[in-house]
Amino acid sequence: MTIQIDNKTARRLFLHRHGLCTNPAVACSRFDIQNMIEKIGFVQVDSIRTVERAHHLILFSRHQTFKHAMLDKLLEDDRSLFENWTHDASIIPSKFYPYWKHQFEQQKTVIAARWEKWGRKGFVKISKDVLTIMETNGPTLARELKPAKTNNKSKPGWWDWHPSKIALEYLWRTGETAISSRIGFQKAYDLAHRVIPPQHFNDSVTSKQFIDWACSSALERLGFATHSEIAAFWGLIKPAIAKSWVEENAADLLQIEVRSHNNTTSKPVWTKQRTLDEITDLADPPKRLRILSPFDPLLRDRKRALFLFGFDYRIEVFVPEAKRKYGYYVFPILQGDRLIGRVDMKADRKNSSLNVRRLWLEEKVKWSNARKSAFESELNRLMRFSGLNDLRIQPDAFST
């Protein structure tokens, strides 16, 4: 008989594996931040700063005594974290660097072919010149290389980059360089061996070890998953490879069923025996209401978020304004084990205010006085974390 996990238990397990079952009010050190990133695997980096950048808000929602400087120290002084690519640009524990070497080798061919096809010619040849400059000058910003020359009057993007800038990105994506620091939000690149700690830079793993780690560590962090979900977690392997891994390790895995948010359907997934052994001892998530980043790992897999939480979410940044259902950059709201709504808000740096435009609650979520108070308390915490002094809520923002 197939073991079946009820939806509430599945949500609690998923929240636990994503670091959202601990008390966010407990004081933390930078070592707690390091441990949190290792627990969840990686933290996505994004340039949009509507309120706070994704990586900062992801960590703040889990440790609300987190300070920006803690992450800077881990990245730039301790070197216990590095930046590279998962499904997108991310901050990753340096101890995982040996596994990324396999990704680097694959990307040398894939990226070069793709970018050349898109019309970005010559950057591979220029890469040697860029490395020579970096060898002599040390950490290098894109602006220190030849600027782009373009007649394109549209908003600049990577298609406007000069080949030297593209070469910088190529060298980073393929492991020749690493991000030494950021000035503002601009990357300062340096030779990888001068950034990555020697014990990680010099370490290596076999192809088999790489695949085993990519699959096993993904399943550990997801709690339960299909082979496609396992492959998608790190973005390092193809679903076919994950499927083969599952078949080869079937004796050490369990196939179970997880119930959907409305208990109408079940989904077959794989898990580990020790995960099932832990389920009964997992703490409930704290009741505190928390505002999440749109790039929070809890929501990265939109289909999983819909299946487990009944939360249909997408980022509408690239959706034409007239076609947006909610807003340009809308933040999900978590309370306990439920995603209860979303909020449209923006930091006004000039006036040092957090401006709340509109709140939407999910179906069957009541806007009680207690919930309103909890929401305003979280807004004030986020306002202070973002270095703002004033909370401004539009009069009709709560007319849900």
Image (cartoon, rainbow, N blue to C red):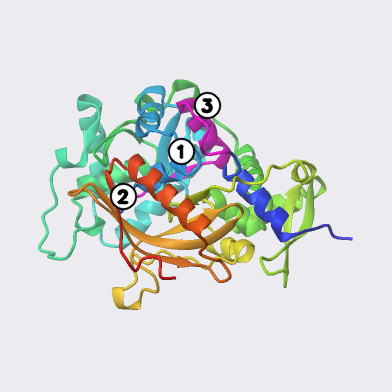
Quarter of the figure with residue 232: bottom right
- Residue under label 1: 64
Q: Position of residue 358 (x, y in %)?
A: 36, 65
- Residue shown at the point (31%, 50%) measured from the top left: 47
Can residue 324 be seen by looking at this rendering? yes
Looking at the rendered structure, the kind of residue marked 3 is Asp
Residues under labels 3 and 2: Cα distance?
31 Å
Query: Is residue 334 shown left or right of residue 163?
Result: right
Q: Nearer the viewer, mark 1 or mark 2?
A: 1
- Residue under label 3: 203
Q: Is residue 98 magenta?
A: no
What secondary structure is found at the residue carrying circle 3? loop
Q: Nearer the viewer, residue 349 or 212?
A: 349
Q: Are marks 3 and 1 in contact (CB under 8 Å)?
A: no
Magenta residues span 23-46
User: Mark 1 or mark 2, which has the lower sequence index?
Assistant: 2
User: Mark 3 or mark 2, which has the lower sequence index?
Assistant: 2
Q: Residue furthest right?
A: 1
Residues under labels 3 and 1: Cα distance?
35 Å
Q: Position of residue 106 (x, y in %)?
A: 47, 47
Can residue 45 be seen by looking at this rendering? no
- Assess disc 2: are there few (<14), some (14-19) or many (≥20) residues with their C-alpha within 10 Å of its C-alpha: few
Query: Is residue 259 shown left or right of residue 52?
Result: right
- Residue shown at the point (21%, 49%) measured from the top left: 163
User: Mark 3 or mark 1, which has the lower sequence index?
Assistant: 1
Quarter of the figure with residue 176: top left
What secondary structure is found at the residue carrying circle 1? loop
Q: Quadrant of the C terminus?
A: bottom left
- Assess disc 3: are there few (<14), some (14-19) or many (≥20) residues with their C-alpha within 10 Å of its C-alpha: few
Q: Nearer the viewer, mark 3 or mark 2?
A: 2
